[in-house]
Image (cartoon, rainbow, N blue to C red):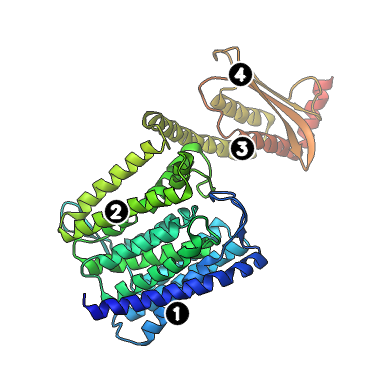
Amino acid sequence: MTVGLIYYFISYFTAAFILALCLTPLLRPFAFAAGAVDTGTGRRAHAGIIPRLGGIGIFLAFVIPMGFSLTRGAWGDLYGKMVGVLAASAVVLVIGICDDLKGATVRNKLIAEVLAAVIIYAWGIRITDVSNPFGGHIALGLFSLPVTVLWIIVITNAVNLIDGLDGLAAGTGILVAATFTLLPGTDFHLQLAYIILAGSLAGFLIYNFPPASIFMGDAGSLFLGFFLASTSILSARKATALATLMIPIVAFMFPLMDMFYAVIRRYYRGVPLGEADREHIHHKLLAMGLSKKKVLLVISLVNVVVMVMVLLLVRQQLNVEFIGLILVVLAAVGGLRLFGYVEFVPFVRELQRNFEISRRSRYFNYIIKRFRRDAGSARTVEELKQRLDELMREYKFTRVRIFLHSYSEKEPFYAYAPEGLPASGKPLMLTFAVVSAEEHVGLVHLTREMDDDYLLCAAEMARAISEEVARFARLHQPVMSALSGRQKR
């Protein structure tokens, strides 16, 4: 790299840095006026009210120097691709701003991210093949589009998830940008783009360093993750023949591991994947007694080690895919144990239990649908009772009574008490109404033993019994009246 080129890069870095330094404070009063503030709930590790929307300053500080460079020409084939990246990034920025201002649903954010990723694909930025760790490449063919979209969405949300500690997302973004800049063979213009991004993040980091006076918000973290994910596809292929997707995977090791841990623990605990919590890696380090600055320093040092490791892997022409895969797996497994997210043996048992529950839930959903279908076609009381018998056997109920007000107040319309079922002496009893047109027309009493078997899809089962018995009673009112008369006599 010549001295003139170094000065050229420094001038663009400085321009982005100064723009971010000047624009970021101007966004504070606007954020307060618009109500785009963070109160420290969810995954945020801070106290007090802090304004968001700092991501707008990052974006403007980045796009102004980038636009100036693009208008000066000489970008060659990368000109169109970079225009596509900026256009798609604007889509992600807008949904991020909407989330910061009024809140956006996970569904709407995902739709915007998919749309932006498809724009990237349409502009020719694609993952067309992946490396085989044992040699050669595997062409993706028709899978190129879904793999490209999935890669961009995963990285975008991984960066978004780590934005829960002052300076963490910005610092990580700077180090990842530096990693791609220093990859051997990286195109000069891609290097310039990463340097401009690093300058805008560095200017913002002045205000975001602990204790932060402003956050980048979803507008900033989504834009940052999306831009790095999109351009990493270009960087990995421009850098070296050995550097395929494994290079970006290793470079994004920290945010990817944090997202991996989040998915594992939320699945492990049965909570929604999109639910915020305070158990990310930086939260775990804070809980160990480290200050925010020390946590940021520790994670930054880890990111520096990762960056050096990536550069050594490439420059030494090692088997990047195989070694990188081993490193990622070891880091993930070690992190799971170190931060106490799961104990391995109980975790495996819990996964087995969850798998069995999921399998049996699908079965009982089928049983309930079959009951609704067969009960709906029942033409006589005996046919309906036969369908009820089948359902009760599947659920292993030991005693069932269904009372209908129009039938008898003392004698049940339907009774079920099979012989041979073991009794543990710990009965579980359920009682719910039979409802027809918002009117209670009867009661259902169910009893079964509390054992190791699962009472799955209980709400759906109760709703099915209530609705189907009420429907039958309504449609076959003359028959029910006749039965009621004989019962009373």
Q: Residues within 10 Å of mark 2 (few under 14, many from 20)?
A: many
Mark 2, residue position: 306
Give me the C-alpha separation between circle 3 and circle 2: 50 Å
Q: Which residue is mark 4?
A: 398
Quadrant where the C terminus is found in the figure = top right
- Pick whichever of labels 3 and 2 is earlier in the sequence: 2
Cα gap from disc 3 to disc 1, whole angstroms:
56 Å
Q: Secondary structure at mark 4?
A: loop
Which circle's residue, 3 or 4, is located before the other in the chain?
A: 4
Q: Position of residue 300 (x, y in %)?
A: 37, 54
Foreground: 220 or 482? 220
Give the label on residue 122, or none. Answer: none
Residue 73 image offset from top left, x and y in percent:
33, 87
Q: Name the element at disc 3.
A: helix
Observer-side mark, 3 or 1, equals: 1
Q: Is residue 197 above or below residue 271?
A: below
* 57 to the left or right of 349: right
